[in-house]
Image (cartoon, grey):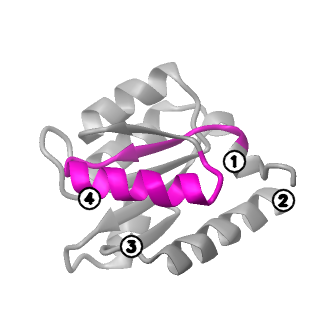
Amino acid sequence: MSKSRLQRLPVLIAEDNKVNQRLLQLMLKHLGYTTVAVENGLEACARLARTSFSLIFMDIQMPVMNGLDATREIRATIPESQQPFIIGVTGLQIKRAECLEAGMDEYIPKPIDLRRLHLLLRKLADRCQVA
């Protein structure tokens, strides 16, 4: 089975909770993705300046720099041709519209369900094929 365009580059996980970080890493590994994890939005921006990622799972509420601010920073500083998909992740009662307004492509609530995650990744992979 060949890798999808999304699977060719690693996935960045920006999540300050180690348990949530590890759980998402295991789910993504099960679905065929390679991951790199950081603990806040500032670290995500710094890592993205050095490495290309196909996708970022961005927790909304993190110390140092939250996910909404990090997404705005990424959208403002990374060239359009190198922009990853960004998925907002949170257990907060935040509206999906807030994530999209900040520049995120999608949103998935915590706790993350493997089936829902798989469907979301297939949707994004389909977008890659259209682009």
**What residue appears at the point 32 percent right and 43 percent down from the top-left corner?**
70
Vertical placement of residue 29 versus 36, above or below: below
Amino acid carrying mark 3 in the image: Ile
* First in residue order: circle 4 vs circle 3: 4
Residue 19 badge: none
Cα separation, mark 3 vs mark 1, equals 19 Å
For this view, does 75 lie left or right of residue 64? right
Magenta highlight range: 8-33
Amino acid carrying mark 1 in the image: Gln
Residue 103 visible to an observer of this rendering: no
Image x and y of residue 36, in percent: 45, 36
* First in residue order: circle 4 vs circle 2: 4
User: Element under label 2?
Assistant: helix
Q: Which residue is mark 4?
A: 60
Q: Residues within 10 Å of mark 1 (few under 14, many from 20)?
A: some
Q: Nearer the viewer, mark 1 or mark 4?
A: 1
Q: Nearer the viewer, mark 4 or mark 3?
A: 3
Q: Which residue is mark 1?
A: 7
Cα separation, mark 4 vs mark 3, equals 14 Å
Image x and y of residue 7, in percent: 69, 47
**What residue appears at the point 36 percent right and 58 percent down from the top-left corner?**
23
Along the line of sight, the residue nearer the viewer: 131 or 6: 6
Amino acid carrying mark 2 in the image: Gln
Q: Which residue is mark 3?
A: 112
